[in-house]
Amino acid sequence: MQAPTPAIADEQILSLLSQEHTAERGFRLLMQVYQERLYWHIRRLVTDHEDANDVLQNSLIKVYRNIAQFEGKSKLFTWLYRIATNEALSFMQQKKRRFSASLDEEGSHLSNQLEADPYFDGDELQIRLREALERLPEKQRIVFNLRYYDEMGYKEMSDILDTSEGALKASYHHAVKKIEAYLKGVEIE
């Protein structure tokens, strides 16, 4: 069975979720359409496969419990990404509090973690890119991920992150410059 287009799927999902007897079917359709995209968005933020799965599960639970609060002022996709992003940020803050380490230790830990991860099949350049991303300020890393990996426009990012398009463009520009510097061997501040 071919997956429905996002616009049609959103209408179907919301219609099914709005009725108690079809809510479970609506949630399964929501997961069919969005789960993989949400997983990869979260994975790029938290890096580890198991952590990404945990954050994804928490995000989906939050979506299921709060779908009645979705007002339709934004696309369903935007609302889902906002929840997933907030869950990933909360997870990273909790993890940071539990494991406060220096950036150097964190960077080498990330390299070891990626090399040992059976779900990561990247080459040396991809590992260096992940290291550079980990060194970016949180906001710049999120904006870079959304723009570079998800090919998201600044308008959509603005809706998800509740930030002006101009600020997002600046964040992306700074992130790219820092990543380029890191890949050339210049240390990022």
Image: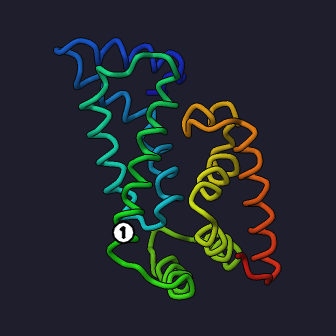
Above or below — where is 111 with respect to 16? below
Q: Residue at x 81, y 64 (%)?
A: 177
Whole-percent x, y for residue 143 in the image:
64, 50
For residue 49, above or below residue 72: below
**As drawn, which residue projects farthest toward the left?**
21
- Depth order, front residue of 134/44: 134
Q: Is residue 98 left or right of residue 122?
A: left
At 45% from the left and 83% from the top, the residue drawn is 101
Residues packed near mark 1 inside 10 Å, few (<14), some (14 to 19) or many (20 plus): few
Task: For the N terminus, give its image quadrant.
Answer: top left
From the image, tell me which residue sits under label 1: 95
The quadrant the C terminus occupies is bottom right
- At a point 65% along the width and 56% down the height, the residue shown is 140
Q: Quadrant of residue 183?
A: bottom right
**Residue lying at 22% horizontally and 25% vertically, measured from the top left:** 24
Task: Describe the element under mark 1 as helix, strand or loop.
Answer: helix
The residue lying toward the viewer, choosing from 51 and 138, is 138
| Residue type marked 1 | Lys
Q: How far across and how far down the image is residue 10, in percent?
A: 45, 20
Q: Is residue 164 left or right of residue 77?
A: right
Q: Which x, y percent locates residue 128?
A: 67, 77
Quarter of image, res 124 = bottom right
